[in-house]
Amino acid sequence: MTSEAPAETRPVAECSRDVPFVAGPVSIGVQSVLYGNNAAQVRRAIASLARAAELAIGEGLATSVSLRLGDSSPRPCLPADFAQEEFQRHREILGVEYDFFDGNLGSAGGHNRLAAGNKADMLLIQNPDVLIGPRALGGLLDCFRKAGVGMAEAKQLPIEHPKDYDPVTGECSWATTACAMIPASLFRKIGGFDAESFFLYCDDVDYSWLTRLQGYSVIFQPAATAFHDKRLAADASWAPSASERYYSAEAALFLAHKWSRLDIVEECLAMFEASSNPDMLRAAKTFADRRANGSLPTPLDPGNQIGQFINERYAKHRFAL
């Protein structure tokens, strides 16, 4: 991807007002998509969420907090009685539901399925291995006390995401859905995540840009914290799996096409097709096949005022990882 000066992160359109700001206590629907997660890991995440829910409800910030778990694993990764046990354990503060999809819907498809049955005012999209901070729900809700905010992201620990943000307003190019809050009404208005284009990666980047295209801001909230463990190689480098390499390469092509950067599409295709890496070659073929049969997403933002493609990233970064 070519290097460019960062685009202005403030929305191009004037902020819409049909999604109200948070003026009082709201219901929060948390949702996580599982794939091969172990029960102990998920129980830890639920325990941290229950404490955050207890504080948010006790302080009058939330009327209720519920958790919906969707399982995309080949077979159920949680025991049959898991949801009932966790519901009983936290029944005074947190509702817990578990849905085995019986098919791998990916991140975007899984969250769309869960959101379709979520009746809460606010959605919290969260990775199943994330331990949410005790005050995180209140910190995220705080962002929506100002009209025009469409998405708010928690600060990840121990490794903070390096993308840049405005230190005064918190505005940023996009929010990672490792732990991010969205008004449910806006999620429905946008149409959820683009599951046709983004199976595993960049669904959150694309959704963030769609949010800004609608005239809403995307906010990074350092007052809300979430512990998101990272697994590194012995030399402290990232060690992606073959599926991670493939889906990230595929997503890069689809994102550049959807956000009207044909130059980057061609640059990536040339690089992938010249590679000896089978994951890169497969991603290039998938894109070429979709282009040939006319099933690519309709390009948006022809003036390139929303999407940011900077040094192979989707925002200016404050530091390198």
Image (cartoon, grey):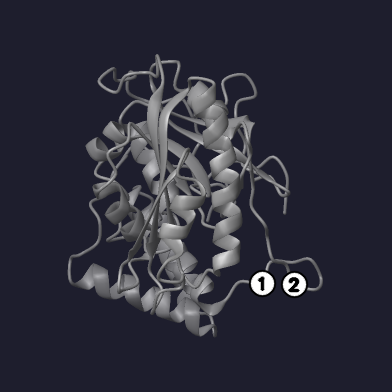
List x then y, in percent, for residue 84. Answer: 41, 58
Report the Cα–Cα distance between label 2 and label 1.
Answer: 6 Å
Q: Amino acid at mark 2?
A: Ala
Quadrant holding the C terminus: bottom right
In-image side of 271 versus 68 (left or right): right
Q: Rate crowding at label 2 as few (under 14), some (14 to 19) or many (20 or more) other CA atoms within 10 Å.
A: few
Residue 23 location (% of width, % of height): 40, 14
* Quadrant of res 184: top left
Q: Amino acid at mark 1?
A: Ala
Identify residue for label 1: 239
Q: Which mark is residue 233?
A: 2
Q: State how many labels appear.
A: 2
Q: Is residue 66 above or below residue 20?
A: below
Secondary structure under tag 1 reads loop
Where does the image place residue 289, in percent across and percent down from the top left? 26, 75
- Left or right: where does residue 296 sit relative to residue 50? left
Residues 2 and 68: in front is 68
Residue situated furthest right in the rendering: 235
Work out whether 148 lies above or below 318.
Answer: above
| Residue 252, visible in the rendered structure | no
Is residue 155 shown to the viewer in this render?
Answer: yes
Q: Quadrant of residue 14?
A: top left
Foreground residue among 142 and 12: 142
The label shown at residue 68 is: none
Q: Residue at x 57, y 26 (%)?
A: 170
Residues at marks 2 and 1 touching, judged by CB atoms closer than 8 Å: yes
Q: Give how far across and how far down residue 298 sits, in percent.
A: 23, 51
Image height check: is 101 above or below 94?
Answer: below
* Neighbours of disc 1 within 10 Å: few (<14), some (14-19), many (20+): few
**Image height of 78 relative to 15, above or below:** below
Closer to the chain start, of discs 2 and 1, is 2
x 50%, y 46%: residue:
90
